[in-house]
Amino acid sequence: MSELMTLLELGGPLTAMGGAVYTRKAHPAVYWATVGLPLSAARLMTSYNSTMDACGLTVQPSRLRALAVRATTRREVRPVPPRRGLLRPTSTGMRVRLRLAPGQEPADVAASCERLRHAWGVHAVHVRSIKPGVVELRLVGFDVLRKVKMPRQVERDLLAVPVALREDASAFVRDYRAIPHELVLGATLSGKSMFLRNLLTGLAAQPVALVGIDCKRGVELAPFAPRLSALATEPSEAAELLPALTKEMEDRYDLIKARQGIAPGMPDEEITSDIWGLPEDERPAPIVLFVDEVAELFLVATRKDEERRDEMVTQLIRLAQLGRAAGIYLEICGQRFGAELGKGATMLRAQLTGRVCHRVNDEASAKMALGDIAPEAVGVASTIPAELPGLAVVGDSSGGWARIRTPYLSLADAAVTCRETAELAPDVPALERFRPHASVSLVTVPVAVTKPSPATG
């Protein structure tokens, strides 16, 4: 009996410890909710003042406060940390707001994120400025990019699509109204196609005209043909489609200029410089152009191909420079995008404000994507592991950058979504002759489960 009690006394804690280790690895969200959150919250609340002091985030109190402390408690006056708000637990971590002390700035807190992470036992700490003097600490309890699960509640709007998860557990929203054009780079099997797939299916549910140029015979974009307003699968077809888009852009500018014929009694709010200021019944549908493997448009074999290439590149540059006001946006994808592609490549890349860099084959490719807007992110993009497809570094012209990862979406599910939303494709007469013919769905033929036995005479 005593041996059984001893076994239970030793086996119980060992079983609990083994279960905790397994849960932490296999189900990190469950482990965080049951074990990690209480421990980290206790560490933060009990060691907040000493941790802030060790990180250099305290300041000397004001004279009035120092006099009040001496008069009421007669103890030594200590440096004052940022005032802490209430802890708000989340499914992936915690959030807490800090009111900065006089003389502090958000960069001071951001510089101590790694120290705070170790002090409070969390996976990562991110800082976000809320308003002058107030920052929000986002504590992430586990690696949310290891197994991507998008937040349940994400604000959606026209031309704003959540396509990936940030490393601070918030959604990365591709907003074309804020960043009109974007460059997406990535090597083979890096997750570039998955990013494009999520983005395209997100836009499919909106009244947006989707146009594709896929010079790989349409292997990437052809499954989405029912929802596309135009598709080019050969450089010769792209050479006809791009001038049609440019002509559509020019017609929209004429529409805007006609609206700007300011009459004496026209209200100020009706004066506009882009299509979004037009009345809704006069506003043309926005157009998003997807170019998969842009290098195929630059490669030439003959003199005639070179002339066609120069013309297509010129059209793309014009769309990138002038398309935003006309409601035409670009999503350019490829493996490399440097000056070696040919004349106009660097100029076109400079017009693409948004940058998404997946795993690349060399550091030079990462510099092509991020070197001119966020140089410190180049090293991070160069070390993306191959076993995490979909992981990428996103940046923009503001200099900010973050790691993101796209959730898995099968090609079959994406194709079904595009087929179900085919009626949402707006009517753009200029693109009608480029509209792909939707393939007829295959009829499933029932297959016998049992093998028929031969007839005997």
Image (cartoon, rainbow, N blue to C red):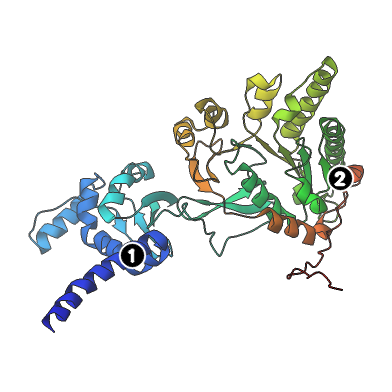
Amino acid type for the residue under numbered disc 2:
Ala
For the N terminus, the image quarter is bottom left
The 10 Å Cα crowd at callout 1, few under 14, some 14 to 19, many 20 or more, is: many
User: Label 1, label 2: how many angstroms apart (C-alpha)?
Assistant: 63 Å
Amino acid type for the residue under numbered disc 1:
Leu
Name the secondary structure under disc 1: helix
The residue indicated by pointer 2 is: 263
Q: Is residue 386 left or right of residue 328?
A: left
The residue indicated by pointer 1 is: 37
Residue drawn 72% across the image and 31% down it: 321
Residue drawn 40% across the image and 49% down it: 127
Q: Is residue 1 left or right of residue 42?
A: left
The spot of residue 339 in percent (x, y) is 64, 20
The spot of residue 413 in percent (x, y) is 69, 58
> Taking 321 as reference, is 131 above or below it?
below
> Taking 206 as reference, is 177 above or below it?
above
The spot of residue 433 in percent (x, y) is 92, 43
Q: Is residue 135 left or right of residue 283?
A: left
